[in-house]
């Protein structure tokens, strides 16, 4: 910061990082993964270097992990104590070996550099070293430091509460506050942080991390309290909540307290209008997607039946639209709440749950059986030559729930223009995001609503006839296909045993619905048999979902330490080999290990292929692993290799894995 240093003074020098877009480095506590910058000084006798003056970090979220770090230009100032015997006119050589862990969304690379600075010694007060010196001075002045804040920490009912008072908190009313711990596993970094103001301070409620859940609150909790009015280092000792730290209103959520990007989202009126327009267009095109078409075609057939009853058609059209909009509102509310809680979810997130997939498979089967005439909901329809078994939910209630069903089956689908709209919605404030989701629902319902409200269009529809029965039978086919696809998805998410239970549930549901629909009117025993079979189907579905949840619980694959000798020995015995080069500070490594490499599907593939799983840990420098990385054109981890007997070279897998990629490579 200074142009020179005087004898007996404290000079401030800084390591400057110029981080390329898409890359980042880490704070003193990196969070869920990563590693801090380290500085190892080589200094003359009697010259000492202090600790890094860490600037306030940003929260960085990636696939469920939340880290603390920096992007762009970063200065890490360090105080240097110059001895009083230093002579003016000389220089002090400062040498530091800096090790930066530089990460992107796909890989991390340790970047060691040796830096040198000759610090001039002159008499008198030194001026700032230009614009760079002023930027370093700003970092030093704004960096968090102790400020006389009294803090207590309380662990109760699964929540960590920090109550803070005194010092700079007296007489101020911050609107936002969040906490950055110095230790790695004190809090759940990805979880939401909530707070309240009080007349003498404030209170923060945090989700405890692994250490506190295991050992309890046995020592002080230290870190940085960041507010919109300043940031300070605090140490909260275990004890009861301090008085005067609540009761004056809730703090506003801090955007980065939920793991969101620091850059503000575009949320102006024009941005909302653009996103809403794309959502409406995407919803209209969604009507043509294969997953939605059968439901809408079924409603179109029902609309044909009421084509010459305009009042009934209008009622059905409005009820269907309300069902669609209500369903989209519920889906959007759940999605936004999960993202606010730090979870990385997107459109179709409910299909990531095997239990939901199992329930949807049963629902699609029931719709297909209904369209096939196996059972009916509501009255039979009059058609030419007598009654047809065309199923139709009765009245406006039926139209409403068909709208709900249309949204349910639309969940796995995306249409052109939807990606922009949904992407914009997920970074907008919740009210604006809800508008975008509702416009998407309006686009889905609009064609049916427009026809139902237009007497001219209704008059052009063909008259009811036996062709409607034939149409209904054909529409059952894609619904059977949808049910089969969902069973396959369920099997891919879990294992064979839960999938067999779900198939048994489908058989029981088909028997039960057939008994209720086709034979209940002829024999009383058939009704009891039917409802009993339906109860069995529901029970089996619940059991399969429970087993799926247990099967999907992440579990680390048992791994041997990597060595070239182990690879060659396995290949010589005819075994394939999966090698995972990883490190504790590697973000994408940890994501892959929590997902693709902890999947029961991957574990099953390793068993079935008798593959050997090896792990090369590069957390600390290992020259053998470094040479192996360089051999495959990599300067950092992750690196995933699959060796097959009889092949000279291994297959290099993508850096962002899915269990499907691993399974295909092994098989």
Image (cartoon, rainbow, N blue to C red):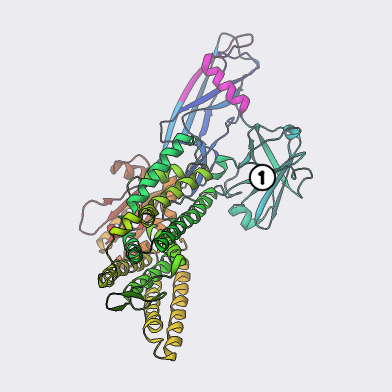
Residue placed most toward the observer, 192 or 103 = 192
Q: Residue at x 35, y 66 (%)?
A: 302
Residue placed most toward the observer, 483 or 312 = 312
User: Is residue 559 shown to the viewer in this render?
Assistant: no
Secondary element type, mark 1: strand
Is 525 in the magenta? no
Residue 410 image offset from top left, x and y in percent: 38, 58
> What span is in magenta?
115-142
Q: Residue at x 49, y 47 (%)?
A: 434
The quadrant of the image that shows the C terminus is bottom left
Q: Residue at x 25, y 61 (%)?
A: 572
Residue placed most toward the observer, 255 or 24 = 255
Q: Is residue 534 above or below residue 19?
A: below
Residue 332 image offset from top left, x and y in percent: 48, 52
Residue located beneath label 1 in the image: 195
Q: Is residue 240 above or below residue 227?
A: below
Residue 3, located in which quarter of the rendered image?
A: top right
The quadrant of the image that shows the N terminus is top right
Q: Is residue 367 above or below residue 28?
A: below
Q: Is residue 420 above or below residue 645?
A: above
Answer left or right for 69 relative to 168: left
Is 137 in the magenta? yes
Q: Residue at x 52, y 31 (%)?
A: 40
Answer left or right for 422 relative to 373: right
Q: How many marks?
A: 1
Residue 369 image offset from top left, x and y in percent: 34, 74
Classify 10 Å Cα crowding around label 1: few (below 14), some (14-19), many (20 and above). many
User: Is residue 264 shown to the viewer in this render?
Assistant: yes
Residue placed most toward the observer, 654 or 324 = 324
């Amino acid at each position: 910061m200074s142009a020179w240093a005087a004898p007996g003074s404290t000079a401030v020098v800084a390591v400057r990082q110029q981080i390329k877009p898409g890359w980042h480095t880490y704070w003193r506590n990196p969070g869920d993964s990563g590693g801090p910058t380290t500085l190892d000084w080589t200094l003359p006798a009697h010259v000492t270097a202090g600790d890094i003056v860490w600037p306030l970090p940003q929260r960085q979220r990636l696939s469920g992990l939340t880290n603390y770090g920096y992007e762009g230009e970063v200065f890490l100032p360090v105080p240097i104590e110059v001895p009083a015997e230093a002579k003016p006119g000389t220089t002090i050589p400062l040498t530091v070996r800096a090790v930066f862990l530089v990460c992107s969304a796909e890989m991390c690379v340790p970047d060691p550099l040796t830096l040198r600075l000759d610090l001039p010694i002159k008499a008198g007060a030194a001026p700032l070293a230009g614009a760079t010196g002023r930027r370093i001075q700003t970092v030093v002045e704004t960096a968090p430091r102790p400020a006389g804040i009294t803090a207590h920490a309380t662990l109760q009912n699964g929540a960590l509460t920090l109550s803070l008072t005194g010092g700079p908190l007296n007489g101020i009313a911050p609107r936002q506050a969040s906490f950055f711990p110095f230790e790695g596993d004190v809090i759940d970094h990805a979880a939401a942080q909530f707070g309240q103001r009080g007349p003498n301070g404030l209170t923060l409620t945090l989700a405890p991390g692994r250490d506190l859940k295991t050992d309890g609150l046995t020592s002080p909790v230290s870190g940085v309290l960041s507010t919109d009015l300043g940031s300070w280092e605090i140490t909260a000792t275990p004890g009861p909540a301090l008085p005067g730290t609540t009761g004056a209103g809730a703090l506003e959520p801090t955007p980065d307290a939920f793991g969101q990007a620091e850059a503000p989202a575009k949320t102006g009126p024009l941005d909302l209008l653009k996103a809403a327009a794309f959502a409406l267009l995407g919803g209209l095109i969604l009507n043509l997607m294969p997953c939605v078409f059968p439901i809408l075609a079924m409603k179109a057939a029902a609309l044909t039946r009421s084509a010459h009853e305009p009042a009934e058609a209008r009622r059905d059209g409005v009820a269907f639209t309300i069902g669609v909009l209500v369903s989209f509102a519920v889906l959007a509310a759940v999605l936004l709440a999960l993202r606010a809680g730090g979870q990385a979810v997107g459109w179709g997130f409910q299909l990531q749950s095997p239990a939901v997939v199992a329930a949807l498979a049963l629902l699609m089967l029931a719709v297909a059986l209904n369209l096939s005439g196996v059972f009916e909901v509501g009255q039979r329809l009059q058609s030419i030559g007598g009654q047809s078994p065309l199923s139709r939910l009765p009245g406006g209630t039926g139209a409403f729930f068909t709208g709900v069903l249309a949204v349910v089956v639309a969940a796995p689908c995306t249409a052109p223009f939807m990606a922009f709209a949904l992407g914009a919605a997920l970074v907008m404030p919740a009210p604006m995001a809800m508008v975008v989701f509702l416009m998407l629902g309006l686009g889905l319902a609009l064609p049916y609503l427009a026809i139902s409200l237009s007497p001219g269009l209704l008059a052009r529809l063909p008259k009811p006839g036996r062709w409607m029965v034939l149409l209904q039978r054909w529409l059952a086919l894609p619904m059977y296909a949808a049910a089969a696809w969902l069973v396959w998805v369920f099997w891919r998410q879990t294992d064979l045993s839960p999938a067999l239970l779900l198939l048994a549930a489908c058989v029981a549901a088909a028997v039960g619905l057939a008994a209720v629909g086709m034979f209940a009117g002829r024999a009383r025993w058939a009704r009891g048999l039917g409802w009993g079979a339906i109860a069995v189907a529901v029970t089996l579905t619940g059991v399969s979902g429970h087993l799926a949840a247990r099967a999907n619980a992440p579990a680390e694959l048992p791994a041997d330490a990597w060595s070239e000798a182990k690879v060659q020995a396995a290949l010589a015995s005819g075994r394939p080999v999966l090698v995972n080069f990883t490190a504790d500070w590697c973000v994408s490594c940890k994501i892959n290990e929590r997902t693709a490499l902890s999947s029961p599907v991957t574990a099953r593939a390793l068993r079935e292929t008798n593959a050997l799983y090896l792990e090369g840990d590069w957390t600390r420098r290992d020259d053998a692993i470094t040479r192996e990385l360089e051999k495959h054109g990599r300067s950092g981890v992750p690196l995933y290799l699959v060796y097959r007997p009889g092949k000279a070279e291994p297959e290099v897998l993508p850096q962002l894995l899915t269990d499907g990629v691993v399974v295909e490579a092994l098989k």
